[in-house]
Amino acid sequence: MKWMKYIFLVALSGLMLLCGSIMPLAAQNQLPTAPLKRSSDTARSGSATISPSNKDASDDVWTNMRTSFSLPLEDLGKKPGIFVGSINAWVPLRAVFPLAVPFDPQNPSTQGPPPNNLLAFASATYFPLGYWFLNFSYFQFIGRKEVLSWHPDFTYSFGYNDWHMYTFSLVYGNYGGNRFNPDVSKGERVTQFDQGTWSLGFKFPAPEFMRSIMEFHPTSNVQHLANLNVIPSYYNVNTSRFEQWQTFLSLQTRYNIYDYFFGLLTLFYYPSAAQQQPWNPDFTYGFGYANWNSLTVSVQYNNYSGNRFPWNKPAQNTGNFLDGIFSISFNITL
């Protein structure tokens, strides 16, 4: 019963913060799981929360805010960048053929429900300066008989993402059907940049009342990430054509329960309900053991399917626990 209470509090606080926050959040722009240490950290508050012993806690908040997007050019040629890599296995709880999404075959969409296939992928992230980063992931589907237009050969993202609380982030991510060898006859391209997602985010700790209940150990903490997300070009299944500027808000709540054990809940809100597609969830969730240290293994469950609140009807073959995926990853930092 105690754990049910904790989960309920996480969900409740997420809903409250979603309604009351100025900035929203995106799944692609997530709270960093690894507190990457950089020389620029000396200008920031190192903790997720502000110590009550400070004379003016707002000074630390302002420091973290104004140092967002800093570019330490003085480190050029002096300090090497940081490389973070992982090798992953993605195991669906059940193999379900994805939603049938009609589209113009001469102009296929790279957007659709997340793949529910057995796959392996390798991901590499490089931080050349400060918290500016480049990410590339290579996917290898196992036993796949049909390649759908939104199943990627690779994905990529870049931008600025600092793990400290009270910092802003700006991330572009393209997680759609990117192709190494596109089939021109099917309208495929190496990538369609305008179908990627831009996410402007802000990180902040949970309210004091929530932390006092849930942070029962020095390694426990509850953090939030609010994002404003924009996709310049998206496929609208209701009109069977591409439309412009899909916009949605999201709020992510990450509860680091103990050590590297965590729970994750992300809520989404579409100001224009007509822009939400069948594969766009009302919420996503996950839990598991995520050890960000080098040469370690992490095991997680995540559900990115078209989860819907009780008052919204889910699309077929989505929104159930068995539509989720277990993943196993091996991490390395250089």
Image (tube, helix red, strand yellow):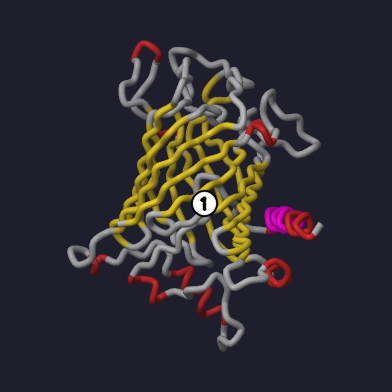
Rendered location of residue 187, percent (x, y)? 39, 16
The quadrant in which residue 135 appears is: top left
The quadrant in which residue 314 appears is: top right
The answer to whether residue 32 is seen in the rendering is no
Which residue appears at 65% of the width and 40% of the height?
A: 270
Q: Tell me if 193 is positioned left or right of 262 in this view.
A: left
Rendered location of residue 107, percent (x, y)? 44, 17
Label 1: how many residues lie within 10 Å, few (<14), some (14-19) or many (20+)? many
The answer to whether residue 103 is seen in the rendering is yes
Span shown in magenta:
8-18
Closer-to-camera residue (83/166): 83
Does residue 297 sit above or below 197 in this rendering? below
Secondary structure of the residue carrying tag 1 is loop
Q: How many marks?
A: 1
Q: Is residue 333 magenta?
A: no
Does residue 147 sit above or below 334 in this rendering? above
Q: Tell me if 93 is positioned left or right of 308 in this view.
A: left
Q: Is residue 10 magenta?
A: yes
Q: Amino acid at mark 1?
A: Gln
Rendered location of residue 226, percent (x, y)? 58, 55
Closer-to-camera residue (214/266): 214
Which residue appears at 34% of the width and 15% of the height?
A: 184
Q: Which corner quadrant holds the N terminus?
A: bottom right
What residue did someone put label 1 on? 30
Q: Tell me if 184 is positioned left or right of 13 in this view.
A: left
Q: Tell me if 234 is positioned left or right of 334 in this view.
A: right
Q: Which corner quadrant holds the C terminus?
A: bottom left
Closer-to-camera residue (288/246): 288
